[in-house]
Amino acid sequence: MKFVLASHNPGKLTEMRAILSEFGVELVSQDELGVHIDVEETGETFRENALLKARAVMEQTQLPAISDDSGLMVDALNGAPGVYTARYGGEGLTDEQRYRLLLSSLTGQTNRTAHFYSCIACVFPGNETITAQGVCDGTIAFAPMGQDGFGYDPIFFVPALRKTFAQMTAEEKNSVSHRAKALAAFRVEFEKYCGEKNIHVDE
């Protein structure tokens, strides 16, 4: 079964393609299909934003569209940046500028606990939906570490592996990340949906 990813983010495409391929889903990007819309994220929750993006791309392609809306929630910042993670600090900033701004906002702060949250939403032609969530707990490092990943990966430290996301291999990150956990929960719901609809993913 072919899904289209409602995102322009190549990092998300790589991560989600690797995980979804494990259960027979072929994932293509909206750019590969010539869909260049940018959906305004007006929702107040990750779930609302994920559904907005998936629904818009499904309507353009008439394929099942899957979207991830993720965010970093820092306890010392009362859960910020949250749904504004990708826009933290305003428009036009690079990933590095955003995570350095976050680091500066935590100067002198000893409570570094944080949580990466992901909501996966899939909207099928006919407007049926599946959603699933995942959380990865960690801390904010005092300085960026690692060269891989994207977004806030260089400053999100996972104590269980003693590495930031940016220091992990793809396999390590896919074993612990919020997105991997959300996709695992999504797999359960998707398989239930396919069973109810008598759908085979290799069709």
Image (tube, rainbow, N blue to C red):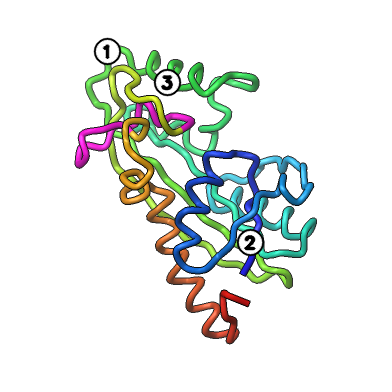
Quadrant (top left/top right/bottom left/bottom right) for the N terminus: bottom right
Q: What element carries label 3?
A: helix
Q: Can residue 28 be seen in this view?
A: yes
Q: Residue type at mark 2?
A: Phe
User: Measuring 28% from the left and 37% from the top, which residue is drawn there?
Assistant: 138
**Earlier sequence position, callout 2 versus callout 1:** 2
Residue that mark 2 sits on? 3
Which residue position holds label 1? Answer: 108
Q: Which residue is drawn at 44% across and 33% down?
A: 149
The answer to whether 21 is drawn above or below residue 9 in the figure is below
- Quadrant of res 194: bottom right
Which residue: 52% across, 84% down? Answer: 195
Q: How far apart are marks 3 and 2 (CA)?
A: 34 Å
Residue 26, how many percent across, how many down? 59, 62
Callout 3 environment at 10 Å: few (<14), some (14 to 19), or many (20+)? many
User: Helix, strand, or loop for circle 2?
Assistant: strand
